[in-house]
Image (cartoon, rainbow, N blue to C red):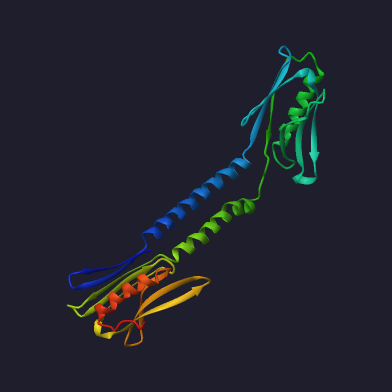
Amino acid sequence: MAIKVERDGNKTVLAQTRRGVRIAAWVLFALAVIGAVMSFREERAAQAIERTAVHCSRAAGVCGFTPSTGSGQVMHIDTLVAATVETDGSGDDARVTAAVTRRDGLPTYRPCEVRASDPEVAGIRRAVTELTAFLNDRNMADLAVECATRRRQASTGATAMRIIGPMVGMAVLLLAVLLFLVEVRTEVDPDAGLVRVKGRSAVPPRRWSIERPIAEVASVMVRQRTVGRERSFRVYLHFTDGTATLLLSPSTGWRTDAERWLGDLRRALGLPAAPS
């Protein structure tokens, strides 16, 4: 927060600006947008279909499994025992997996996995059938087939929550910052016999502007609030008709500076000094 008292000819100006708060608010807003875009892209990637191409050559003695993303594997045909369809669970949410079992203690390889209700399940069954036929028929020279993986099929609501959740948290933080985005300019013009106050706040969003005779100013009041060890201050200009207007918004730790600024303002308004 920047607060300063300066002279403009015979005028005394008390100005509060919040350039740092504005910058912080824009940074938080940008981070929220970037976070939402990244979350959306991650969700799209998580739900994207990954296709695995299977190419076997009897002459070369190998089968290659090449996914559309990530690295593939090349296996010797002689190490392959069988290809099967594994089902984990029941109903539409059951996971259907293509499993290639291997001898010599080598781990089972699972190139593709989808839900039972996904349309790609037919491709898994077809790939397993053709790979089984190739392994059992030594007269087959080559094999080219593919299957697909859809690792997560999140509901629209769950996807929205994963995207919106971080944005809500960032919005709360942004709101906390915007509470301090209050800018006020107070001008005491003795030549015109007027005091002018113009201000604006982000939360709640509002603007105010007053112009009153200096003679109607009753006092400058500081309202202090203590939260734990921290003290915050608001400064108001009170008028003889009982109305008031905000001069300085919440701030902490500047009591000494505030007294100096308000002393200058009281002198410009012709008010007595604050009691010690």
Residue ID at (43%, 56%)? 24
Q: Name the one closer to the observer, 25 or 225.
A: 225
Give the farthest residue toward the front: 276
Residue ID at (51%, 59%)? 171
Query: What percent of the width, then of the height, locates residue 113?
Result: 72, 36
Q: Quadrant of residue 118?
A: top right
Q: Is residue 94 visible?
A: yes
In the drawing, does residue 1 fall left or right of residue 51? Answer: left
Q: Quadrant of residue 262?
A: bottom left
Give the farthest residue toward the top: 59
Q: Which quadrant does the C terminus fall into?
A: bottom left
Q: Is residue 122 above or below residue 6?
A: above
Q: Which quadrant does the N terminus fall into?
A: bottom left
Residue ID at (47%, 55%)? 28
In the drawing, does residue 235 fall left or right of residue 134? Answer: left
Q: Is residue 210 visible?
A: no
Q: Name the one closer to the observer, 230 or 156.
A: 230
